[in-house]
Amino acid sequence: MYLQLLASAHNRKILYMSVLTALLLRFPALPCYAQTKITAAPDATGVYAANLLAGSALNLDGLHSRSIILLARHSLQILSEKNAGRPVYPASLTKIMTAVVVTDKLTDLDARIAVPGDFFEFLEQSHASVAGFKPGESISVRDLLYGVLLPSGADASLTLARQTAGSEEAFVDLMNAKALALGMTSTHFMNPTGLHHPLQYTTAADMAKLLDYALNRPVLRQMLTTKYYRTAATPEHPQGLFLKERLFFLLREQARLRNKPELDSGALSPTTQILGGKTGATSDAGLCLASFATIHGREYILVTTAAMGDIFVDRFHVTDALQIYGQLDQLLGKV
């Protein structure tokens, strides 16, 4: 009887948390400035003041993304934000944390891992994006990480999670511990893939912190700025797997639509260059993008999340980012 009561109480707690999270994500919340604010370091070069002026003039109206934050990497100065402390579902932005935790624990990137075969049916049923590795295939940690970050492979994510922590559940514990260590106080993970779960949530502000941290790790910065990558040959893939980064694929698409060939490589103008990032999309999360760019010689991070649309057709996360980066380019050119 006692065990039944405990189980009942546990189920009620899960139900309560699920309902509370759903309500927070469904309805707009007041800005959480205590959680959103990132302490900036004013400088004596005039860049801080220029950012302040440009940020105050940025217009975020009319964009599809419901939660946005733009910050300067050199000072962590927030230039502009909209609902940056509001809970959102992270979708595959989750995989940035997956890569961070893996590189925390697995230092030999050339070590090889056999891909488990028991999760492929689940991934297919969940319509998860995969890199294309085969069950039993022996892949290096490095190649699996590229599989996580470029094509957003859930197969690579689960393989690395199990190798790192022994199980997906233990790996998720590491993800949440890392989030707390980074001050991501409004983030909670339930899986390393970004597949929808009502208790997996974050904020644009927390994702900006995470991306900034990842970019300080050279191996992750290299991967997040890579457009194409071919994995090492295996018996299953004698030519290796050719992996394409999703953000630059979408930028090439925009280059054709806008008749701007320079956008194919991420160049918005002679003074603005998108360097890389991570996309994410589910029907519940909407279209999400955590990206970074150099503008007038300085590096900026932009997170655009919860752009609701057809995740197979619309490109609102990318078009919103192009509009914001374009505005900042013009504004900084005037101050």
Image (cartoon, rainbow, N blue to C red):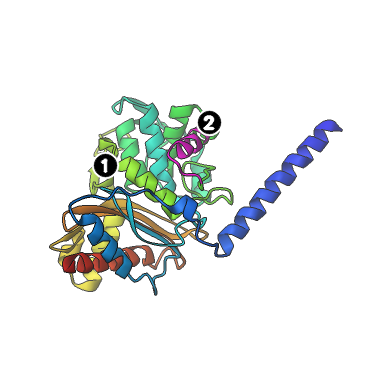
Residue 68 appears in the rendering: yes
Q: Which span of residues is magenta-colored?
A: 173-185
Count of marks overlaid on the render: 2
What x and y, as percent, mark residue 189? 52, 43
The residue type indicated by label 1 comes to: Arg
> What residue is rendered at 39% in x and 67% in y?
313
Residue depicted at 33% across the width and 49% down the height: 40
Task: Give residue 293's position: percent from left, percent from top.
Answer: 24, 55
Circle 2 crowding by C-alpha within 10 Å: few under 14, some 14–19, many from 20: few
Query: Taking 288 as reference, is 215 left or right?
Result: left
Relative to 272, residue 13 above or below: above
Helix, strand or loop at disc 2?
helix
Amino acid carrying label 2: it is Ala
Q: Rounded to the nearest whole Å, what is the CA distance between mark 1 and mark 2?
A: 26 Å
In the rendered structure, find residue 170 and report the number of the disc placed on it: 2
Q: Residue 221 carries which label?
A: 1
Residue nearest the observer in this picture, 41 or 55: 41
